[in-house]
Image (cartoon, rainbow, N blue to C red):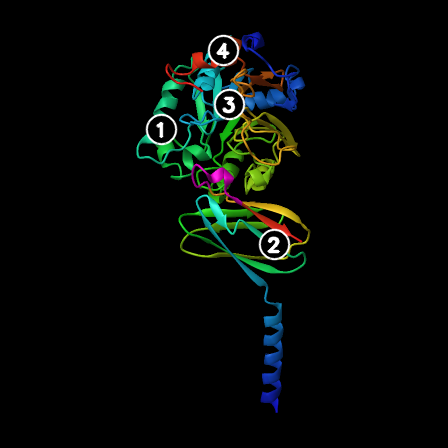
Amino acid sequence: MSKPFDRRKFLKVSGMSLGVGALISVAPAMAGGGPSATLRRWFRRQNGEELTPFNLVQLSDAHVGFQGPPNPTGTKAFERAIDVVNGLDPQPDLILFTGDLTHEAEAPGEHAKRMQLFQTLTSRLKSKKVMYVPGEHDAALDNGVLYRQFFGETHYAFDHRGVHFIALDNVSSGKPAVGTEQIEWLKRDLARYPRTAPIIVFTHRPLFDLRPDWEWFTRDGDDVLNALAPYENVTILYGHIHRHDVHQTEHAMHYASRSLIFAFPDPMTAGDKKPVPFDKEKPFRNLGLQSLAEKKGRLDVDDVELTLREFGGTDGVQQILKSGESL
Amino acid sequence: MKRIFFTLLSVVILGTAQETQPRVVTISAKRFEFTPSQITLKRGEPVTLRVSAEDRDHGFYQKDLKLELDLSPDHVAEATITPEKTGRFVAICDHFCGSGHGNMKMIINVE
């Protein structure tokens, strides 16, 4: 059995655990041979794998290649997040990356270089099971052609520790949509599972209308949620909004991870969608990741903010910039 | 006599149809702006928005006004709406079109 995450390894965990998601609603009966034991046996038959505790980390929106005032430190927050994840004991047995791995570039060859740099950086992760979905900055301008060369298919599904994971692409058509073909694929994929199966969907954009005038929505998100509606234990992880968020729809919990490049303001109070200004005193303020752990059928979700005390202040920021650069 | 009656009837029908033709507002899209950047509509008055894309595919999306158009340079997209509430509505391009895409928007005022 896995040891629980040692959250002291994180430099800062923002707030309390947000463990409000039921991974499997029948979990308390697991020890007593109730419905979840049936589910466990079903998974074992299907996959040779029981429903067992796991830890996973969600990383999002690194925007490798981004240059600009909202974050003059480039990939430093992403690199720090990799160090944080590598410091976890036990190591997460799965890492999900929910899009915008890179920032788009129109100069010939430049976007491919950014994807190569992203892969070089992620190769430092000790945990080698890393799964990806694209963001619009990765895949929308060329309908995912370059992304597929580096990362493979943009939507797929797999089972891990007795949980069914579904990667959904709501970017590569160019518009915020999953599309009819992928939704039909999703329905066929789901049809193989009982309604009690624990399901984790990961995608880039929110599947609900969070702030449509900021493009924080998916046009056919309702169709996706309707396809998932018969299933009792659905968790949806996404990125795109560059801030942590928790939302409940009728039958699913939705969690957004912070970005690793810059943050956006609170959509409920801000008028315009403008990045939160860079803070020299706290260069990685508002940036971070999300950690999730299965515990007795519940899914603990922790929002983790990166902080770097050793790099605080202007001197500190200069330390993490490349030699010769200045703010 | 019958012919005169039907002629008159068709004139009346055509006249009525012409009277109720919605006003047409033309909008064009190119990276990363809409022209004009602001339009004003009247609550309760039908209007046809005719939206063209000059350079590449774009989107034209405004949820409250039920506007959801896919634009491409080879055709003009069109939607007829009757705004039911007043206010200031932000319409966006929701087809990712490059580095300035996030700021490609226009204002629709409904008075």
- Residue beneath the point at 49% across and 33% down: A168
Instruction: Kindly identify which residue carries mark 2.
Output: B40
Instruction: Kindly identify which residue carries mark 1.
Output: A150
Task: Judge if badges 4 and 1 mark residues of a common chain.
Answer: yes
Q: Is residue A70 above or below residue A310?
A: below
Q: Is residue A85 above or below residue B101?
A: above
Amino acid type at mark 4: Phe
Residue A311: which disc?
Answer: 4
In the image, B13 versus A5, the foreground residue is: B13
Where residue B51 sits in the image (x, y, percent)? 49, 54
Residue B67 visible (yes or no) = yes
Q: Are discs 2 and 3 less than 8 Å apart at CB?
A: no
Mark 1 is surrounded, within 10 Å at the Cα level, by few (under 14), some (14 to 19) or many (20 or more) other residues, namely: few
- Residue beneath the point at 62% across and 81% down: B9
SS category of the residue bearing label 3: helix
- Residue beneath the point at 42% across and 32% down: A138
Magenta stretch mostly in which secondary structure? loop
Residue B63: which disc?
Answer: none
Instruction: Output the chain of dot 4.
Output: A
Instruction: Kindly identify which residue carries mark 3.
Output: A45
Which is more N-terminal, label 1 or label 3?
A: 3
Instruction: Output the chain of dot 2.
Output: B
Write down the region rendered in magenta.
B96-105
SS category of the residue bearing label 1: helix
Which is more N-terminal, label 1 or label 4?
A: 1
Distance CA(mark 4)–CA(mark 1): 33 Å
Q: Nearer the viewer, mark 2 or mark 3?
A: 2
- Residue beneath the point at 34% across and 24% down: A116
Which is more N-terminal, label 3 or label 4?
A: 3
Where residue A274 sits in the image (x, y, percent)? 55, 32
SS category of the residue bearing label 4: helix
